Every structure is written in C-alpha cells, then in structure tokens.
Amino acid sequence: MLNSQMKRCLPILAGAACAGASLACAVLAWQGTETIKAFRADAEVKDVGILKQQEEKDVVFRLFNATSAPVEIVQISTSCTCTRAEAAVRNLLPGESTELTARLHIGSRRGQVAALVNVLYRVGGTQLERLSLTITATVEPHYTLIPEEVVFDRVEDNNTDLSLEASFIIAPSNGPAMRVLKAYSTHPAIEVKSISQDTETGNTTIHLVFDPTRCIAPSVKAEVIVHTDSKLEPIHRVPVRVVSKRVD
C-alpha cells in the first residue's frame, strides 16, 4: 500500500523539482541579463606588450551601450600627460557602439607602466557615472644601470665608514650607441670621482666617493644626475643612500 502511494507521489515530486529548477534557471538568466545591461568596453585592461622609450602606441577600446536608454559621453580624462584619448562618437543610442582611441606616449619612462583612461558618461540624462580603462606596457630602456641604487654603509660608533667608495655601470641595452656626457651629485658629501667608458662593450662606469666629514645627518638620501647623449633618455637620476649601522 505504501509503495503504491509513493509511486503515485513520485511524478508530483519530480514535477515540483523541475518547476523549481526552471524557476532557479530563469532567475539566474535574468540576473545574467541584468549584469550586461550597462555601458561597457570590450576590455577594461589592454596590454600593448614591449615598447621602446619615446615610442607611441594607439590602443582602441570599443564602447557598447547595452542599456535601454541613450548614453552621452561627457568627458574623457587620462591619468598622465603621456596619454591622449578621444571617442569617435559621444552620443550612443541603445545598442550602438563606438571606438575610443587612446595614444600612449612612453617618453623616457622605463619598466612596467600603466595609464588610466576615465570615461565620464550619463545614461538617459541621469547623474554622471565613470568607466575606468587601463593600458599597460613593458618599456625596454635604451640603457640599464647596475645597480639601480647605490648604498654607502656607515658605522655610527666610531664614525668609520665601511664603504667610502662605490660605483655603478651604465650599459646600453638596445638602440644606438651612447655615451655619458657628465654626472654630478645632489649632496656635497657624495662626489663623482671619475667616469670611464669601455669602448669595446660601450659600458660606462661611474665611480663615487662618500666624504663623512661633509655629512651632518647619520643617514642621507641623494641622487646622481647623469647626462647622456641618448635621444631616448638624455637624463637619468640614480638614487644614492647613506645608511648608518651600529657595531656592538
């Protein structure tokens, strides 16, 4: 008897389960539809790969009006003067799209760089909203520095310096040959002693001397300003630190 009752209930339970599953699927589908009904770009981040210094690169974003109202692009701004951006069309009806072209000018920057493009817009005349886009690149510099920062160690107790001299090397990494024209320090306690170039490798070694008698503070931060004949990066600032160490 019990088995027959269960058999009669099974179709009802199965139908209820299917109905519940269908409702859940419908809710998920509705939520998914809602997430794409917006003013958006084909990608929020675009990487342009490896560039050289002073190189320029155009990056194109496609903007979509997936809302049910007109979209007005009010303003386009960038995070730095190295980037300019403009949209082909500023007013988009529902379902329309346009191209936003951003020109990235690398200048003398080096390493990993990122530029932000902010698009301010209105949907149907409402309050302003913002769409943020990012351009990334890896810049291969004309020359490298080994090391990238110079550190002098200074002993506090007897005012004896562990390292009175230091040096760094400027080595061309790509592009035409280059040479160092001059170099000087921004702090009187740190002096550029000599500049020597290896004609075979093209590397230039800059020797520094630290004079503790001209250093009042226990620690110092300075820069060595290097002028080169490179058209890609004519001036480079090398950080220099004097670090005090206590000897027990």
Image (spheres, rainbow, N blue to C red):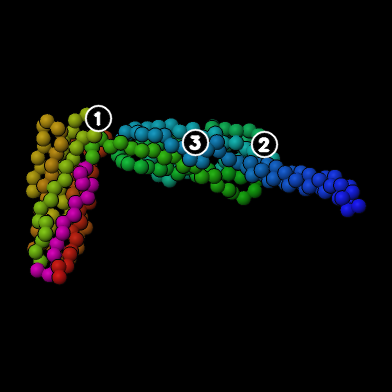
Q: Position of residue 17 (x, y in %)?
A: 78, 47
Residue that label 1 marks: 175
**For the magenta stretch, what is the residue range?**
145-158
Q: Which residue lies at the image location 9% right of the left edge and 56% below the top edge?
A: 164
Q: Position of residue 101 (x, y in %)?
A: 48, 33
- Determine the CA span between mark 1 and mark 3: 32 Å
Amino acid carrying mark 2 in the image: Pro
Residue that label 3 marks: 86
Residue 29 as seen in the image, left or right of residue 115: right
Q: Quadrant of the C terminus?
A: bottom left
- Determine the CA span between mark 2 and mark 1: 49 Å
Circles 2 and 3: CB atoms closer than 8 Å: no
Amino acid carrying mark 3 in the image: Glu
Q: Position of residue 61 (x, y in %)?
A: 51, 35
Q: Which residue lies at the image location 16% right of the left edge and 45% below the top edge?
A: 168
- Determine the CA span between mark 2 and mark 3: 20 Å
Residue that label 2 marks: 94
Most foreground residue, 159 or 97? 159
